[in-house]
Amino acid sequence: MTQTMLHGALAGGRRPDWIRVPMAAPTVWMATADGLVSLDLIAVERAANGERQGWTLTGDEARYAAQVMFQRGLSYSVIATRVGLSGSTIRDWFPEQTVTLDPRLARPRPSKPKPKRKPKPVVRCGTMQGYRRHHRRQDPPCDPCREAKRLADRYYAAHGTYVGAPEVAV
């Protein structure tokens, strides 16, 4: 069979470096332990070559594509990205393909220090924040907080902000 070159690609839209999926028809039925499954081999071939964008493979198509890519010698991370699954799923499907790393090659991971939390400011009664705390806790406000709320509302009416509102001494 001769293939003519068209603008750097082979006939049929295939590039010379593509991973070819053996296909006699674009859609085939495959017998599995769960029964018959339908595979779209064009989708499998496009995913194997990194052309999967905006669509997903079925589980059976993803497994078949991963099997084809393992035969071509691609790594877990590349296969997982191309079929759209996690690396742990690929490792679960193909445990025989796992490569145990020499522990001497492992890089130590720096431990992330826990972020320091800023201490919350103490909310005192006799302030607008104290009144809001009573309201948030759904308990009746005390007299100093009620008076602070009245003063703050007057201040807001005059200045348009609660910032700088007077507080009641407790």
Image (tube, grey):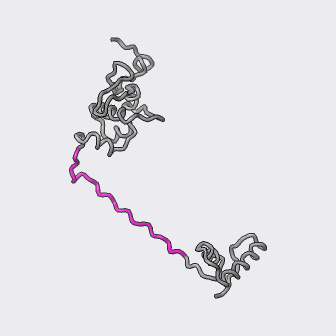
Question: How far across and how far down the image is residue 39, in percent?
Answer: 37, 27
Residue 101 sits inside the magenta stretch: yes
Question: How far across and how far down the image is residue 115, in percent?
Answer: 44, 66
Q: Is residue 101 above or below residue 29?
A: below
Number of marks present in the image shown: 0
Q: Is residue 103 above or below residue 95?
A: below
Residue 128 sits inside the magenta stretch: no
Question: How far across and how far down the image is residue 164, in percent?
Answer: 69, 76
Q: Quadrant of the N terminus?
A: top left
Q: Answer left or right for 105 relative to 148.
A: left
**Residue extending furthest toward the top:** 1
Question: How far across and how far down the image is residue 118, in percent?
Answer: 50, 72
When asked about the image quadrant of residue 12, the answer is top left
Q: Residue at x 34, y 25 (%)?
A: 29
Q: Answer left or right for 36 relative to 151.
A: left
Magenta segment: 99-120
Q: Nearer the viewer, residue 11 or 6?
A: 11
When asked about the image quadrant of residue 72, the answer is top left
Q: Residue at x 41, y 28 (%)?
A: 43
**Residue extending furthest toward the right:** 158
Q: Residue at x 78, y 74 (%)?
A: 158
Q: Nearer the viewer, residue 47 or 89?
A: 89
Q: Is residue 140 above or below residue 104?
A: below
**Residue extending furthest toward the front:** 35
Q: Quadrant of the C terminus?
A: bottom right
Principal SS element in the magenta part?
A: loop
Q: Residue at x 60, y 81 (%)?
A: 124
Q: Nearer the viewer, residue 139 or 168?
A: 139
